[in-house]
Image: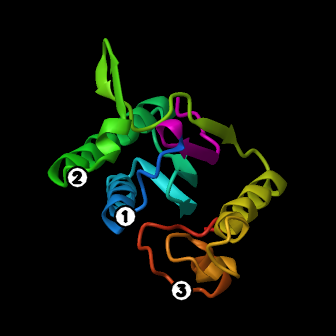
Amino acid sequence: MLVKQYPEFLTVTAHDWLPVLSRVDDKRIIIDSLRFLVNVHRIKVAAFVLMDTHFHLIWQVLGEHKREDVQRDFLRFTAQQILKCLRNEKSELLHKLLFNSKDRKYQVWQRNSLGIELRNAKAFLQKLEYIHYNPVKAGLCALPEDYQYSSARFYELNVSDWDFLTHYED
């Protein structure tokens, strides 16, 4: 029997709040990974914002996929790709991500990302607003729709910059 999974608000933070998503290429890794997961029908993405040190999503895991598995694979893959870019560029940031635990040498994402099930419209809309106003509160733009790496333009201006988004009413 298929159990319906609710949409979830997810916050993923870089280890030690380091700016692992400060470059366009780093943000592209997250975007491309979300697009892939949508295209293979593992998730739907209703909203997102990518900041330099963290990102927020409202996503829903589809079918019989388990949220824990999808999230683990997504975070592992994006971490590997970010580390690969940092190695290729010989970035100083790579040294700050050294972790040297028994199961890994580097840590890109903090463990235990915050995930909150959104079981009603009020909770969903509150998190949608929170996501879209994150860059405004950080002083990166005056209006949510001015920030490029967000779904705000999709909702505020009906502009579809991101082909992997599904409107929350759909």
Q: Position of residue 113 (x, y in %)?
A: 56, 35
Q: CA distance from mark 1 to mark 3?
A: 23 Å
| Secondary element at image label 3 | loop
The magenta segment:
1-16
Would residue 148 appear left or right of 97 to someone viewing this image?
right
Q: Give the residue at mark 1.
A: 23
Q: CA distance from mark 1 to mark 2?
A: 10 Å
Q: How many marks?
A: 3
User: Neighbour class for label 2 at 10 Å: few (<14), some, many (≥20)?
Assistant: some
User: Neighbour class for label 1 at 10 Å: few (<14), some, many (≥20)?
Assistant: few
> Considering only order in the chain, which callout, 3 or 1, is on the residue closer to the N terminus?
1
Tell us which disc is closer to us: 2 or 3.
Answer: 2
Badge 2 vs badge 3, beta-carbon distance below 8 Å? no
| Secondary element at image label 1 | loop
Q: Position of residue 35 (x, y in %)?
A: 36, 61
> Considering only order in the chain, which callout, 3 or 2, is on the residue closer to the N terminus?
2
Q: Position of residue 144 (x, y in %)?
A: 67, 76
- The outermost residue toward the front is 92
- Residue at 50%, 35% (x, y): give it: 67
Q: Is residue 35 above or below residue 81?
A: below
Q: CA distance from mark 2 to mark 3?
A: 30 Å
- The outermost residue toward the top is 102
- Residue at 71%, 68% (x, y): give it: 133
Amino acid type, residue under disc 3 in the picture: Val
Residue 97: quarter of image: top left
Tell us which disc is closer to us: 1 or 3.
Answer: 1
Q: Give the residue at mark 3.
A: 159
Please tell me which residue lies in front, 81 or 152: 81
Q: Give the residue at mark 2.
A: 85
Residue 141: quarter of image: bottom right
- Residue at 64%, 65% (x, y): give it: 168
Would residue 2 appear left or right of 92 to someone viewing this image?
right
